[in-house]
Amino acid sequence: MPRLSLFGLPLRFRGKREAYTIKRMISVAEAIQIVKEQIRPLPVERTELAHALGRFLAEDIIADSDLPPFDRSQMDGYALRAEDLKTIPAQLGIAGESAAGKGWHNELKPGEAVRIMTGAPVPVGADSVQQVELTREINDGRFVEILESVERGKSIVTRGSEIKRGQTVLRAGERINSAMMAVLASCGYAEVKVGSRPRIAVLATGSELVPVTAQPERDQIRDSNNYSIAAYAQVAGAVVERLPLASDDPQLLKSQIAEATERFDVVVTSGGVSMGVYDFTKTALRELGAHLFFERVALRPGKPTVFARLANGTSVFGLPGNPVSVSVTFNLFARTALLAMQGASEPALQEKTAVLARSVKGTVERESYLPARLQTNDEGYLMAEPLKWGGSSDFIAFARASALLIVPQGIKSLAEGSKVRVVRLPD
Ligand code: AMP
Ligand code: MG
């Protein structure tokens, strides 16, 4: 293994995908690095442009023509020569009309103007457009009076000023947003190469769980993790299936995981990874021959998170059962895998800096990812307001969080006003 390191983490070369097991508790950064290393992009596919929103580009997007493709008028008005407006008002002869889609393709001579519409080509010889509000047609439309002078070049977008033919406009690995749809359309991409969507199965484990349609009886609760995980996975671009609930029965759990791993690229389980007598997820994975890359992360909440791979290549994320731990660990690790599979250039949540609005407590041996609301204050600072919450089971309070604020390992508390790292939570 190469001895390069980044921030103290061992760097392994991409492409080398050797299996390694880490038993010790690893840092969040290390765990994310392992996920990025171990996950390979899925095959590329072509999609119709209309279905490309939210997908990750698998090719650079190149302009196939100059944009605009001709000198284009930005206004309804008159195309003219600025030097013909030395005395104001100036009278110019109207030589013709240039409309969007039907230009006037002669040469404008001195003393002439062409009636022009927004989006129409500016005729050769004209160097400016005066807007119609500052003009008046006279003599039955044979002449126009220009009421104000113009600076040369006014209201003309020159050919190629937005993009030149052959230039790269978007790069492989970028996520296609609504505005980029216009770019793709303008460049003629009726179909676009994108990373395939990962197929993911969501499997909640726990004998206390009942489906949302059921009235919980004594000792039971409704499963909520399957819904939050499926929603986050969908937002991350995956195609999701929620599997029937699994009870804490080692044999059944094993066969349910085995079945799921046959049909999906990723399986995300929740529950059953702690130290309890009925926590069977890791045993099931081991008995299925899965390779566990890590199983303990120095993270609060979410310490017992598992990342594993089956011999057939299916990745498994074993998340803890607490609904808040689920949201935190899914977005830190499983989401990173789903985006990496789609070829994202930035698969992990991106950290930003904010100012802490109220003091928070950290943990000595773990990094804390605490629910917070981000808001810009009147001075323009991004403020992170920690939520009042009852811990990793309090998903009601967590539903109001827009971000996680990070308290580094070993820091007992952070004072109000200090700078904190934050990651925005996906919707
Ligand atoms: P576990 O990690 O299995 O020990 O579960 C930790 C806590 O999360 C327990 O209180 C469980 O009842 C709860 N829990 C586990 N799975 C779910 C789920 N799918 N929906 C809601 N709560 C859950
Ligand atoms: Mg459980």
Image: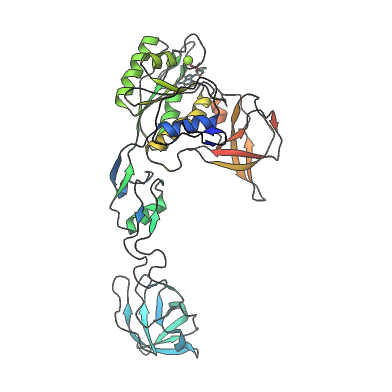
In this orientation, does residue 331 appear?
Answer: no
Residue visible at 29% across and 42% down?
45
Q: How many marks?
A: 0
Q: Is residue 348 left or right of residue 44?
A: right
Question: Can you give x and y, in whole percent of width and height, for residue 288 in the image?
Answer: 35, 16
Question: Can you give x and y, in whole percent of width and height, for residue 348 in the image?
Answer: 48, 37
Residue 344 picture quarter: top left
Question: Can you give x and y, in whole percent of width and height, for residue 392 in the image?
Answer: 56, 24
In this orientation, does residue 274 appear?
Answer: yes
Residue visible at 39% across and 90% down?
111
The vertical placement of 13 against 224, above or below, is below
Residue 184 picture quarter: bottom left
Question: Can you give x and y, in whole percent of width and height, for residue 272 in the image?
Answer: 46, 16
Toward the viewer: 295 or 110? Answer: 295
Residue 195 picture quarter: top left
Toward the viewer: 336 or 111? Answer: 336
Toward the viewer: 233 or 146? Answer: 233
